Amino acid sequence: ENPFLTSKLTGFVCVLAAACTSGFAGVYFEMILKGAKTSLWIRNIQMGLPSILFALVSVYTKDFAKVNGNGFFHGYNFVVWGVIALQAIGGLVVAVVVKYADNILKAFASAVSIITSCILSAFFFQFRPSMMFVMGSSLVTSSVFMYSNPKLNREKRRKQSPLPYNNKNKDLRRS
């Protein structure tokens, strides 16, 4: 058996599983945020506490001697605190976007952010994207345009509606 083909198959299955579980998690997250009577900030605290507990258990099981000897915040500098702040602010922004928009918009925003980072990296760090990246970026850009174009969305809704629709009367469902 060829290990190269096996690793490709394993990689494909892993990416497929990650895409499915990520999609499910995004939809579930949206349902939790939009369906709850609890405020967005309390919900963020409720969802963040388990991750803090898991992180603390991980730190103390793997690095107990270092943490015990030097303290928990040993080695933290301006850059580390900056990354922590960016991650925290990013989590809050994602929650607000999902609460007041939807999960699809959040996915598009993430994709646009990756493309923007690539463009900035090309200017500042001489990064050269591959042809596959350029093709993927083009697909993402066109999908963002199609999703956000109200004219395309209106026409799509008309085609999907089982009820008659007329531009002159706007809506024949009342007749």
Image (spheres, rainbow, N blue to C red):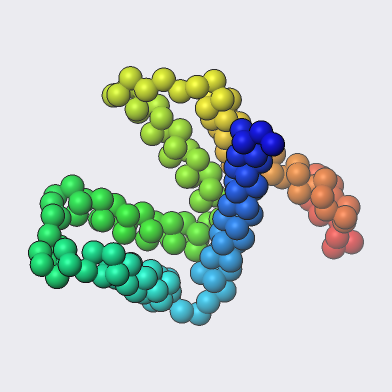
Residue 156: name its quadrant: top right
Viewer-closest of 135 and 12: 12
Q: Position of residue 101 (x, y in %)?
A: 53, 57
Residue 25 % position (x, y): 56, 62
Residue at the farthest bottom position? 37
In the image, taking residue 142 as reference, residue 110 lies left or right, namely left
Q: Is residue 142 visible?
A: no
Query: Looking at the picture, does residue 157 appear above or below residue 173?
Result: above
* Residue that sits furthest to the front in the current view: 1
Between residue 20 and residue 66, name the one nearer to us. Answer: 66
Residue at x 82% of width, y 45% of height: 159
Quadrant holding the C terminus: bottom right
Residue pictured at 41% horizontal, 33% vertical:
116
Q: In this rendering, would 155 be left or right of 93?
A: right
Q: Residue at x 57, y 55 (%)?
A: 22
Quadrant (top left, top right, bottom left, bottom right) of the N terminus: top right
Expressed as whole percent of the image width and height from the top left, the position of residue 79 reads 18, 47
Is residue 77 in view?
yes
Query: How many numbered marks does the figure carry?
Result: 0
Relative to 170, say whether 128 is above or below.
Answer: above
| In the depicted structure, whether residue 33 falls above or below residue 161 | below
For image coordinates 45% across by 33% down, the residue present is 115
Q: Is residue 150 placed above or below 133 in the rendered structure?
A: below
Quadrant in which residue 61 is drawn: bottom left
Q: Is residue 57 left or right of residue 143?
A: left
User: In the image, residue 54 lies at what x, y percent?
Assistant: 37, 70
